[in-house]
Amino acid sequence: MSDIKQEVEKISSANSESFNRQDAAGIAALYADGGMHINPAGPRTDIEQFYQGVFKAGFDHQEVSVDDAWPLGADAALAIGQYRISGRNPSGTLPQRGGYWTATYVREGGKWKIRMQTAIPK
């Protein structure tokens, strides 16, 4: 089995690259079918639309770290890390948010995908 932390870091890097390009479809493509994002506002399965709203609110930069990852057999894994997003909203202020994330990954079509990700603000 390949090193799951390296696989998760690849997904996290692709996620940040898509975020920094404001590519909501690119982020959504990292999620498994029926994938879910959960934050204090509740669970979301409309991943692309959710991130379009994040970009519309002025956020355009993301930094992510992967603190640890654990395999759950050959086709599932868990990971935890930290995130920080920032940008400039329409009124010109610089919003910033950061916190911790957790995620469950599954192998779908031979590729690792996010099945469920939770973002918990600090």
Image (tube, helix red, strand yellow):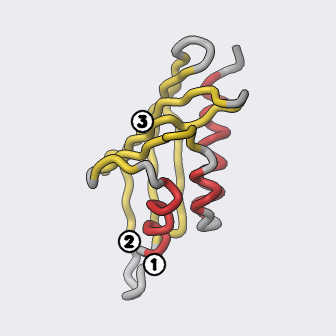
User: Hey, what amino acid is under mark 2?
Assistant: Pro
- Residue positioned 56% across, 43% down in the render: 31
Q: CA distance from mark 1 to mark 2?
A: 6 Å
- Is residue 67 something that shows in the picture? yes
Q: Nearer the viewer, residue 42 or 55?
A: 42
Which of disc 2 and disc 1 is earlier in sequence? 1
Q: Nearer the viewer, residue 46 or 88?
A: 46
Image coords of residue 107 (percent x, y): 63, 26
Which of disc 3 and disc 1 is earlier in sequence? 1
104 vs 88: above or below: above
Residue 62 marker? none
Q: Name the element at disc 2.
A: loop
Q: CA distance from mark 1 to mark 3?
A: 26 Å
Quarter occupied by residue 25 = bottom right
Which of disc 3 and disc 2 is earlier in sequence? 2
- Is residue 122 something that shows in the picture? no
Q: Name the element at disc 1.
A: loop
Q: Which residue is mark 2?
A: 95
* Residue 102 horizontal side relative to residue 115, left or right: left
Image coords of residue 45 (percent x, y): 43, 48
Image coords of residue 29 (percent x, y): 63, 49
Image coords of residue 78 (percent x, y): 48, 25
- Residue positioned 70% across, 30% down in the render: 109
Residue 88 marker? 1
Q: Which residue is mark 3?
A: 102
User: Hey, what amino acid is under mark 1?
Assistant: Arg
